[in-house]
Amino acid sequence: MSFDGHQAPLLDVASLRGEFPILSREAYGKPLVYLDNAASAQKPRAVINAMKDAMEHSYANVHRGLHLLSNEATAAFEDARKTAAAFLNAPSPDDIVFTGGGTDAFNLVAYALGVSEIGEGDEIILSLMEHHSNIVPWHLLRERKGAVLKWLDVSEDGAIDLDAYRAMFTDRTKLVAISHMSNVLGAATPAKEMAKIAHDHGAKILLDGCQAGVHGPVDVSDIDCDFYVLTGHKLYGPTGIGVLYGRRDVMYDLPPFRGGGEMIDTVTTEAVTYNDPPHRFEAGTPAILEAIGLGAALSWMQDKGVDAIAAHEAALAAHALEELSKLNFVRVFGRAPGKAPIIAFAVEGAHPHDVSAILDRTGVAVRAGHHCAQPLMKRLGVTATSRASFAAYNTHEDVEALIRGLQKTHQMLS
Ligand SMILES: *Cc1c(COP(=O)(O)O)cnc(C)c1O
């Protein structure tokens, strides 16, 4: 992944902001400065309208219908799958499973691998900077199946030592489940190299792309991973929808996670046979409107230019990091070169919750807490941090508002 957008086209941020209705509201009578994008992004009109249009004009259940509305809804739903496949450069839309979100995708893979190949004593490699949703499903396999979790250390900037990683593999290693980008440190992991090393040792690799997918182009064919996870609501799309990309041969060998309609081939009173992927993993009526909304969000990102968005965000991150380094009462966690615009920090002598409460009153929304990454908090020697995270619609004025808010916070708390 590259964040140096020298050749990237420019993003027209002022006009792009006009596409987000919520950005015109105020917070406590002040302009809204929304810097909680790593938790969830705001939605452009393209997404809002796609979902509204579907409800107003083309709504019915998908796949089984033999009538106009069902056919239209099915076409829109399947178009979203094609868009997701193109977004990730997956070989085919059939390699894309719609899930209930990022968390749902990790649980799907963990459950299915726990049935088919991960048993007592088998090893799973995780890093210390994983999000809880890419930790807890593997702990469930530890509790239920006796799987062994092995933890890869990361530097304070979120860098990975590939030699240390390589040395962790044994003949019991079945899977690597690792973040493609930390939701705290903003550092991207060397996914392609890590995938190669995993495969050289006969292990599979799952990448958590819930952040990486937002902040730069992703090419699952080039990375050559077995699984890749996206979540819709951080990609300017709706909640309740995510994407699991799975390699064709791997997905065909995987047993289902949930049972119900759509995922079967035949059902008798004695037995059941399963549908092929991706349908095998989409039991029941899917999140039709949310999939359509996600498709619209990914198309919107592609229209603006994923590279152009990344270049703008890189400039915001560089600006913010430079200004923050001038505040001698602020400690920044993670300064990897070219990192994504996700900045965790501490204000000397102040609890992160107080920092975010004071910033909030200035109209600046940031997150405070452990960011669903308690092992990383322990690694960094803290229990919580503040986190400012930027999106395509943020501006250099937003960076300045954050800095002014922090100066005010420091005055009030010292
Ligand atoms: C948000 C996030 C998740 C979880 O996604 P949900 O949409 O909350 O299920 C997983 N990993 C990372 C890195 C995230 O940022």
Image: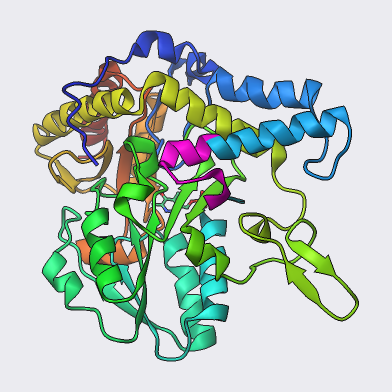
Start-end of magenta stretch = 83-95
On screen, residue 246 versus residue 376, left or right, reads: right
On screen, residue 17 versus residue 71, left or right, reads: left
Asked if residue 42 can be seen in this view, the reply is no
- Which residue extends farthest top? 15
On screen, residue 50 versus residue 109, left or right, reads: right
Asked if residue 122 can be seen in this view, the reply is yes
Relative image position of residue 368 (x, y in whole percent): 37, 46
Tell me: residue 278, above or below residue 18: below
Relative image position of residue 320 (x, y in whole percent): 20, 30
Assign the C terminus to one quadrant of the image: top left
Q: Is residue 354 magenta?
A: no
Q: Residue at x 28, y 22 (%)?
A: 401
Tell me: residue 7, above or below residue 321: above
Q: Residue at x 70, y 32 (%)?
A: 75
Q: Is residue 94 magenta?
A: yes
What secondary structure predominates along the stretch shown in magenta? helix
User: Closer to the camera, 399 or 317?
Assistant: 317
Q: Residue at x 32, y 42 (%)?
A: 387
Relative image position of residue 242 (x, y in whole percent): 55, 47
Tell me: residue 277, above or below residue 267: above
Tell me: residue 264, above or below residue 50: below
On screen, residue 287 versus residue 139, left or right, reads: right
